[in-house]
Image: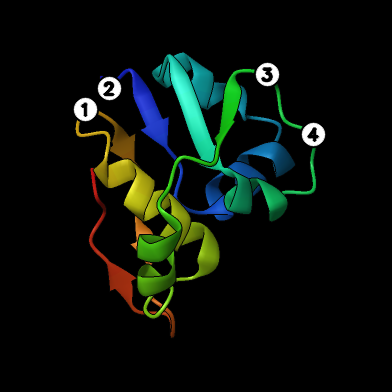
């Protein structure tokens, strides 16, 4: 089991919050991390164990945004900098699925 999970999309967190099961992520991973852009898509309060990061390169972010949504672009670049981290799958604009980065 990875020590860190990088969430590349707000949808998994929103879904878990809605069903009251966000703690499942904490049971599976020591740390769960999202970018500030992903955080901005989540209206619910999040527990302190969900880390919010801005550690992604803005130039790479802009390039990735050509094919990915903003949250996915920010997290995808940052996730690639952390080889030991797991990741949620990302979705290409237009509804096509890209294979997960995990």
The CA span between labels 1 and 3 is 22 Å
- Residue at left offset 69%, top offset 38%: 17
On screen, 85 above or below 60? above
Task: Say above or below: 53 vs 40.
Answer: above
Residue under label 4: 45
Q: Percent from the top left, x then y, of residue 1?
A: 25, 19
Kindly identify which residue carries mark 1: 84
1 and 3 marks in contact (CB < 8 Å)? no
User: Compared with residue 75, is residue 24 higher up or lower down, i.e. above or below?
Assistant: above
Specify whether 39 is left or right of 81.
Answer: right
Which mark is in front, 4 or 1?
Answer: 1
Report which residue position mark 3 lands on: 48
Say which element carries label 1.
loop
Label 1 and label 2: CA atoms lie apart by 7 Å
CA gap between label 2 and label 3 equals 19 Å
Quadrant in the picture for residue 98: bottom left
N-term mark: 1 or 3: 3
Comes first in the chain, label 2 or label 3: 2
- Residue identified by numbered label 2: 2
Question: In the structure shown, which secondary structural element does the residue marked by tag 4 occupy?
Answer: loop
**In front: label 1 or label 2:** 1
Distance (Cα) linking label 4 and label 1: 27 Å
Position in image of residue 88 (x %, y %):
37, 46
The reply to whether the C-beta atoms of the residues labelled 1 and 2 are less than 8 Å apart is yes
Q: Residue 7 in the image: state x and y as whole percent.
A: 46, 43
In the foreground, 28 or 62: 62
Label 4: how many residues lie within 10 Å, few (<14), some (14-19) or many (20+)? few
Q: Residue furthest front?
A: 59
């Amino acid at each position: 089991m990875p020590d860190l999970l990088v969430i590349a999309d707000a949808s998994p967190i929103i879904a878990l919050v809605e069903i009251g099961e966000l703690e499942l992520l904490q049971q599976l991973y020591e740390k769960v991390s999202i970018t500030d852009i992903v955080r901005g898509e989540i209206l619910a309060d999040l527990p302190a164990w969900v880390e919010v990061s801005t550690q992604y390169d803005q130039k790479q972010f802009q390039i990735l945004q050509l094919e990915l949504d903003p949250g996915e672009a920010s997290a995808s670049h940052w996730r690639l900098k952390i080889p030991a981290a797991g990741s949620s799958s990302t979705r290409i604009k237009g509804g096509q699925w890209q294979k997960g980065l995990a």
